[in-house]
Amino acid sequence: MAGVVVIFDFDKTIVDCDTDNWVVDGLGATALFEELLPTMPWNSLMDRMMSELHSQGRTMEDIADCLRTAPLHPQIISGIKTAHALGCELRIVSDANHFFIETILRHHGLFECFSEINTNKSFIDEEGKLRIQPYHDFNFASHGCCNPCPPNMCKGVIIKRIQDSMSSEEEKRIIYLGDGKGDYCSSLKLGERDFMMPRKNYPVWELITSSPLLLKAEIHEWSDAEEFEEVLLKLINIALSANKKTPELLSMDRKFPTVSRLPHKTFPQVLQVPH
């Protein structure tokens, strides 16, 4: 295993959309969503929307079919597969939910590239409808973070746990990619040997560039799929070279096996992906 851990946000980082909005809009529930949005927290609203869609006769397969059309650029796919083939450990930290993420990753043959997915819990209840629950139960207690984190998830807490879990016998470097305000807390947890890849002109980039000296990590921006792949692979090569573990970069034309779709029932907060 190479000494590089790559941590991705999901919405507007791996997929070029907000998956919640993609499903709500794609299944014709935008008007109700916008009506309810001022009245409840986002996670509660998405759980309510799944119940509304179920009552309208929408099935889990309808939701999955909609998710499979979410925009995911081929160079994002090739960048992830190449990073995995080079031996990097890949993880996701996202404020989406497990069913949405896993459905999209399996559709594009990417699910088995990731060792762990940290996101909001989702499950199928006895009536056959998708339920969505927050990663952190903010109704019970606050996660205590003072940064611009949503009440249901402090990504900085998750990054700290990942850092604490790393073996002390091997120095690993983290590359973190994200776009939203929720990714800012993660960026502040990175060390001097790590890399932060904020998406240019998105909220986390604006927060970082307003006070760049608050970060210890090197900052390398990206704006589109081409730069995503180019910058990510460049930073992986830098990290591997520093560790004197530099395998030859794989050709982007290399054929990778796809991952078949499997039926799912429950989707926990932290999913350890078996290999």
Image (cartoon, helix red, strand yellow):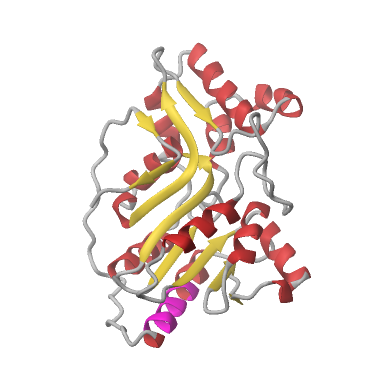
For the N terminus, the image quarter is bottom left
Is the magenta region chiefly helix, strand or loop? helix
Q: Would you identify the image quadrant in which residue 61 lies? A: top left
Q: Would you identify the image quadrant in which residue 18 lies? A: top right
Q: Residue at x 74, y 52 (%)?
A: 146
The answer to whether one can see residue 199 in this image is no
Q: Residue at x 38, y 44 (%)?
A: 271
Q: Residue at x 47, y 34 (%)?
A: 121
Residue 225 versus residue 181 in the image, above or below: below
Q: Would you identify the image quadrant in which residue 59 lies? A: top left
Q: Is residue 253 left or right of residue 6?
A: left
- The x, y position of residue 195, in whole percent, is 54, 74
- The x, y position of residue 173, in whole percent, is 45, 74
Which stretch appears magenta?
A: 231-240
Q: Residue at x 46, y 47 (%)?
A: 118
Residue 107 versus residue 8 in the image, above or below: above
Q: Is residue 236 magenta?
A: yes
| Name of the residue lying farthest toward the front | 168
Q: Is residue 49 magenta?
A: no
- The x, y position of residue 142, in whole percent, is 68, 39
Q: For the image shown, how many numbered marks are present on the structure? A: 0
- The x, y position of residue 101, in whole percent, is 43, 43
The answer to whether one can see residue 217 in this image is yes
